[in-house]
Amino acid sequence: MRVAAVDIGTNTVRLLIADVGDGDRVPCEVIRRSVITGLGRGVDASGRFASGPLTATLQALARYRDLAGAHRVERIRAVATSASRDVADPSEFLDQAEAVLGVRPEIIGGDVEAASSYRGATAGSPVPPPATVLDVGGGSTEIVHGHAEPTWCRSIDIGSVRLTDRLLQDLPAGAGRVTAARAMAAEAFSVVRTPPGNAVGVGGTITTLAAMARPDLPVAGRPLEAETIAATIERLAHLSVDRIEAIAGVPAGRAPVILGGAIVVEAAMAAIDASTLVVSTRDLLDGIALDLADRA
């Protein structure tokens, strides 16, 4: 069965079209697309989507509808995560998204997001269980631990966009605001207590950090060390957005929030006592695709 999974995130709108069968543990990828729209920028303070990012998001969804049709997708599911959970009234956005995509997005809770991310990240993963998956998004970070199935999960309301909106909007940030951002992230993750496990990292922030460290190598399956992230934070703290955009491996739309994202990753790794994580390019989208096969 050919399915399409759409993730409407705080910073990025993503699509996976894949072939899945009953009992498959790994989706067979047909295409994967990602567009940075910044949908959740400013939502933390205003409770509303800004018109520019909203328009860009709807345009991305229209393109994904066309791709799904061109690839003869049989079933499609769209989910909306942290930013859509935060807006005061998401119904107008959901109506607009349904009109362009053809299906109504589901606003999923952090626990559902975490479980699907775990399933996707561990599908075909070389990391032996037990595993702890970090899914660092724009508005929230999902941490989920398990063996064959997740046994513990927590969604923390801190991510690359949320931390940037609160403390790091103007770049260069300088040492003082970086220190304050690190303290805020550490406080957010202070409630996390996971059993020991091998750390797996997913999401655009983590894949970007891996690409920055070694832009000449594929990111999937790469180790990413805490000391590398700390060094990246020190480097980014003194750079403008333009100079960050010029760094190999940084997509233009991610440059304004990658410093905040790196600080969130650093704090999350410290919370689960991980000095290294393995980067996975399979994530929430893959989990949704597998869920679609189960439902069929």
Image: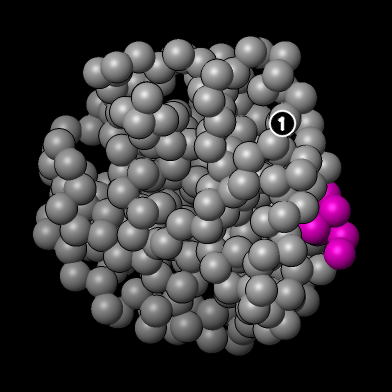
- Residue drawn 34% across the image and 74% down it: 189
Q: Which amino acid does label 1 sit on?
A: Tyr
User: Measured along the vertical axis of the image, is residue 201 above or below residue 243?
Assistant: above
Residue 209 locus on image (x, y percent) = 54, 47
Asked where in the image residue 239 lies, by quadrant, the reply is bottom right
Q: Camera-side residue: 207 or 24?
A: 24
Give the overall secondary structure of the magenta segment: helix
Q: Is residue 185 visible?
A: yes
Residue 57 in the figure: left or right of residue 21 = right
Q: What element carries label 1?
A: helix
Residue range in magenta is: 51-56
Residue 204 locus on image (x, y percent) = 56, 46
Q: How crowded is mark 1: few (under 14 residues within 10 Å), some or many (20 or more)?
A: many
Tag count in the figure?
1
- Residue drawn 19% across the image and 70% down it: 193
Q: Residue beneath label 1, please?
A: 64
Q: In which quarter of the image is the C terminus?
A: top left
Q: How is the image coloured?
A: one colour
Residue 216 in the figure: left or right of residue 19 = right
Residue 281 locus on image (x, y percent) = 46, 33
